[in-house]
Image (cartoon, grey):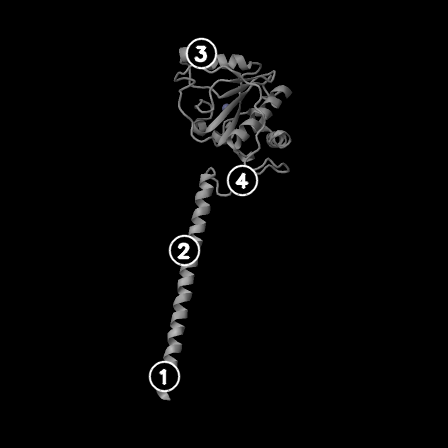
């Protein structure tokens, strides 16, 4: 009788031990799986472009531009690529494009063609190193000077992973006229789709170096926010 009792007790304690081990095993397995899931989410988000939560970053206020960003039609481009030279088109490949950088020429009344020719002549004058991927002119024309797969000299430390756009302006205020503004909206919208960029990826030269460029959009923060909202609206209405 006593033996039987002891045996049953032993059996009982054995099964308790087994259960305890099973629980420990479950916790270990669950913890390992959780770590793997967190790691997978982290790696996936890195792969999505270095942003931990791309959906949260892609904030277009009232406008839904999709994820990935909807693509709008490419605006008409006047392609006049610069000669490869170390002063304006070094021929260096860009990295993954993470931003579109907006500039103003700081040269009131100058045309897109004037600015493009200035960049081109640097190969002979060696005055300075400067250029941009695109120039938007006073009549809304867009000249492309450097392919987006190549670096231009406009945005300092961000030259390597951004696309730069210089904009012409009629006077010292730096404010863009309606035609320039509209072409800029269309060009930036197109580039957002091409490189899957969100609102926070549209930046000013000022946001890179603190330089007063583009002047009007630095001095009028509301106009800058309005510009980005206009881009979002354009993408929402015209993107596919
Ligand atoms: Zn600039």
Determine if the C-beta at disc 2 is less than 8 A from ligand 1.
no
Discs 3, 1 touching: Cβ within 8 Å: no
Spot occupied by residue 194 in the image (x, y as percentages of width and height): 52, 29
Sooner in the amino-acid sequence: mark 2 or mark 3:
2
Whole-angstrom CA distance, mark 1 to mark 2, is 39 Å
Q: Which residue is mark 1?
A: 6
Spot occupied by residue 188 in the image (x, y as percentages of width and height): 56, 27
Mark 2, secondary structure of its residue: helix
Observer-side mark, 1 or 2, equals: 1
Spot occupied by residue 23 in the image (x, y as percentages of width and height): 42, 66
Q: Residue at x 60, y 18 (%)?
A: 140
Observer-side mark, 2 or 3, equals: 2
Q: Residue at x 40, y 73 (%)?
A: 16
Whole-angstrom CA distance, mark 4 to mark 1, is 66 Å
Whole-angstrom CA distance, mark 2 to mark 4, is 29 Å
Q: Is residue 165 left or right of residue 225?
A: left
Compared with 223, 115 (above or below) is above
Q: Is residue 175 visible?
A: no
Sooner in the amino-acid sequence: mark 2 or mark 4:
2
Whole-angstrom CA distance, mark 2 to mark 3, is 61 Å
Quadrant location of the N terminus in the rendered image? bottom left
Observer-side mark, 3 or 4, equals: 4
Question: Please, which residue is most extreme toward the bottom here?
Answer: 1
Q: Which residue is mark 4?
A: 57
Q: Which residue is mark 2?
A: 32
Q: Which residue is mark 3?
A: 121
Whole-angstrom CA distance, mark 3 to mark 1, is 100 Å
């Amino acid at each position: 009788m006593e033996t039987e009792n002891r045996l049953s007790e032993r059996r009982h304690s054995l099964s308790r031990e087994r259960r305890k081990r099973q629980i420990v095993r479950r916790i270990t397995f669950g913890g390992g799986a959780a770590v793997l899931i967190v790691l997978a989410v982290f790696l996936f988000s890195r792969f999505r472009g270095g942003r931990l939560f791309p959906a949260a970053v892609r904030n277009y206020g009232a406008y839904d531009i999709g994820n990935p960003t909807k693509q709008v039609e490419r605006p008409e481009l006047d392609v006049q690529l610069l000669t490869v030279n170390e002063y304006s088109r070094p021929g260096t490949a860009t990295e993954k494009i993470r931003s579109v950088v907006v500039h103003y020429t700081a040269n009131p009344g100058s045309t897109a063609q004037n600015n493009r020719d200035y960049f081109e002549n640097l190969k002979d004058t060696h005055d300075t190193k400067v250029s941009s991927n695109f120039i938007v002119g006073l009549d809304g024309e867009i000249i492309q000077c450097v392919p987006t797969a190549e670096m231009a000299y406009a945005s300092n430390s961000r030259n390597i992973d951004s696309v730069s756009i210089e904009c012409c302006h009629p006077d010292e205020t730096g404010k863009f006229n309606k035609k320039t503004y509209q072409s800029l909206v269309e060009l930036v919208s197109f580039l957002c789709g091409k490189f899957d960029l969100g609102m926070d990826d549209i930046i000013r030269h000022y946001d890179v170096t603190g330089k007063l460029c583009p002047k009007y959009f630095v001095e009028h923060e509301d106009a800058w926010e309005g510009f980005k909202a206009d881009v979002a609206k354009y993408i929402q209405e015209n993107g596919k």
